[in-house]
Amino acid sequence: MTQASTADVLIVGAGASGATAAKHLAEQGFSVVVLDQGHWTSPSDLPGNHPEYELLWGNHLWHPDPNMRSRPEDYPTNLDDSEQPVYMYNGAGGSTVFFAAVWSRPLPSDFRVRTFDGVADDWPISYEDLQPHFDATDRDMGVSGLAGNPAYPPGAPPPLPAHPIHLTGLRMAEGLNRLGWHWWPGYSAIPSRAHGHQTQCVRLGVCRTGCVVGAKGSADVTLLPDALRHGARIETGARVARITLDENGLASGAVYFQDGEEKFQPAKLVMLGANGIGTPRLLLMSDSARFPNGLANTSDMVGRRLMLHPFGSAVGLYEDDLEDWVGPAGTQIECMEFYESDPSRGFVRGSKWHVMGTGGPLEMATRWHIGEGVSEEPFWGAEFTARMKQSIGHSIDWIVHAEDLPEEHNRVTLDPTIADSDGLPGAKITYTTSENTHKILDFGLNRALEAHEAAGASKAWVTFRNFSSGHNLGTAKMGDDPETSVVDKWGRSHDVPNLYVIDGSVFPTSTATNPTSTICALAKRAATHIVETRREQEVSTA
Amino acid sequence: MSAVEVRLEPFGGVVLSAAQRERLALLADVVVAGGAGMPSASGAEVHTQWIDRVIAVRADLAEAVSRVLVLEGDPDEVLAGVRAGDPELFSGFAFAVAGAYLINPRVRRELGYPGPAPMKSPALPGEAEAYLEDGILDVVIARGPIYRPTPDAR
Ligand SMILES: Cc1cc2nc3c(=O)[nH]c(=O)nc-3n(C[C@H](O)[C@H](O)[C@H](O)COP(=O)(O)OP(=O)(O)OC[C@H]3O[C@@H](n4cnc5c(N)ncnc54)[C@H](O)[C@@H]3O)c2cc1C
């Protein structure tokens, strides 16, 4: 087996979390090796360069569901027992290649869900613990936004000025003002002017199919170049099969496949940033005599509490031309009016909403074709062109993200029947959207329809009530108690003291926000902790 | 850097015969009949030109097109039957036709899109501020904080 020299830190996954840790550790002089099963994505290959970008996003190369994409670097998921598909991208930058770059901090109450609402668990850390790391990762990812949002505690302003809220945001803001509901210009990890490695956003509006101009805060654009500059080694096409242990029970490196060859990368410390699905999969694949149920899994919590964080969407049509295709696609304005719990609503926790660019004409056709109420109306045939004229450029889309509370039966396990291109087991997903999550979504969507009415929509309807978000969370819970959690408040395994989990797996609760800001802040905090405790840190010397 | 640049080629799909294209013209016009100042599917060269780009990148839609093309009979009746009996196949076919129609630059222009593909339009200096100039955010700010602070914040 080929073996490289020992790294100070080995990171599995070059996505949002892995790239954040790689940059900050390499900058501090650590020797860092990153292994990712996927490859670098050339901007010229991305769908957004082509007129048929909407069609490309559903094909065998670019579909957000790895089962539909099925590139050799993707691992399959068995969805027989899952209500939702699981979305992700595997390669340098990870799922940030596809993410809409909606950059959303959680609220203080998200860290105290049990204290405030008597459900799920408090996080072992607070909003204030993460605040300096939010600020740092906002700079890393080129975040644009407006300071002073009353939905959040005071803090440093976003590093870049907000994008225009555009005609869509303005129109909806007027409606929300009529209702007396909160709104604020959206935050995007997309720079409103050139920033670091990122170019200024040119508002193509195709963010979710990959940014073709290198503006979006895709980790391969923002973070990995800095990691490389500080000496990190990034191995692509390198699929990790298992994390190894030395005789002291410390993580000693990873066995991986690259170009069909089995290799070993030794390391003093190992970090997993392989996504909320890939990380539990890898821990479960790394079973041993010491950990027969999977590495770092004496709690039996690895893979459990999966939160797929489904969202809903409600579109409205307007008489005025609102140029709804203008980017950044993710968020023109956001609304946190219904974020906090209100027991009178019949559910706990709440939702975060954002106005999103409407994608393209084919996405608009989908809205008509499947929309609640409108799918029964004539659309195809003689109606098609009139309907499209009525809606293209004239729509506003509300995305409603619900908090998705953890349930132990929602989980990731290894699937004995399907395997990836290296013969490693696929991930079996067991997931049912809970009644509470449904209630939050239904309530939020009904209010979103009211917002459309207040903004003067001529017609509005719900397109999705329970749709997969690509937010894969909760499968290696963070907590103080080793009996009920996988990692401690730094992301360090309770069982293996030099093994860290730094991705969305560690979320004790999902929050109702888009998670990547929190994921990056957690990864940055773990990296800073490793730097600060380097003298006390137990490391493998195998 | 040990980066592997992978060039990804799109799916090399089916090539339609002249007879299939003729049949497609009739079926596609059932899906997009035209009107409101816009052409039908065949009027927008869906069957002669744009369908090829759909087929080239989407194996699933190519299959739906092939499966519908072999069905004989009156186009309206054929598609009504497909819609009733196999809604998924109907969706595949309808989206193949719509996808082809909607990448025709003429169609996009008539729908109000600024270009055949997404167009660059960087924000103008002062554009973001202009939207907020009239104090539209004032009421939101005046209502004050709406978050619940950390109870044990240090
Ligand atoms: C379509 C879409 C839209 C989204 N929009 C938003 C948004 O607007 N805002 C937001 O906050 N979030 C959004 N997200 C979610 C966001 O992309 C993720 O939260 C974030 O990328 C997760 O970071 P991560 O590091 O945990 O995992 P990823 O970024 O997914 O990276 C994980 C990496 O690990 C690698 N890996 C996994 N297993 C192995 C293995 N065994 N060996 C080697 N490598 C491995 C993978 O190849 C991958 O590159 C979106 C996601 C999708 C799919």
Image (cartoon, coloured by chain):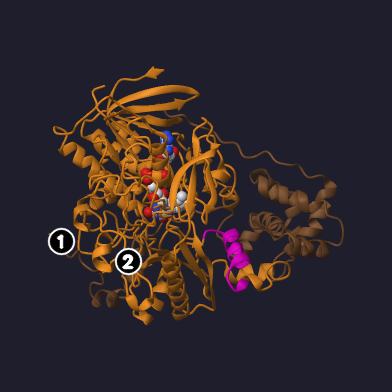
Chain colours: A orange, B brown
Point out which mark residue A338 bears: none
Q: Which one is nearer the viewer's eye here, A176 or A239?
A: A239
Q: Position of residue A430 (x, y in %)?
A: 48, 51
User: Spatial distance from mark 2 to mark 1, Cα to Cα?
Assistant: 34 Å
Q: Chain of mark 1?
A: B
Q: How many numbered callouts?
A: 2
Magenta stretch containing residue A114, yes or no?
Answer: no
Image quadrant in which you'd find residue A227: top left
Horizontal and vertical percent position of residue A194: 34, 48
Query: Disc 2 marks which residue?
Result: B129
Residue A399 figure quarter = bottom left
Crowd rating for badge 1 (residues with CA inside 10 Å; few <14, some 14–19, many 20+): few
Residue A94 is drawn in which quadrant? top left
Image position of A291 with respect to A140: above or below:
above
Which residue range is magenta in the image?
Answer: A359-374
| Residue A308 x/y as whole percent | 43, 55
With B52 as the anchor, is A501 left or right in this view?
A: left
Residue furthest out toward the left: B154
Left or right of A133, for residue A355? right
Q: Is mark 1 within 8 Å of ligand 1?
A: no
Mark 2 and mark 1, same subunit? yes
Q: Which mark is residue B153?
A: 1
The three-letter amino acid code for the residue at tag 1 is: Ala
Given the image, on which type of amino acid does mark 2 rest? Answer: Glu
Other-residue count near label 2 (Cα within 10 Å), few / some / many at <14 / 14–19 / ≥20: some
Residue A217 visible in the current orientation: no
Residue A288 visible in the picture:
yes
Residue A133 vs A387, above or below: the answer is: above
Q: Quadrant of the C terminus of chain A?
A: top left
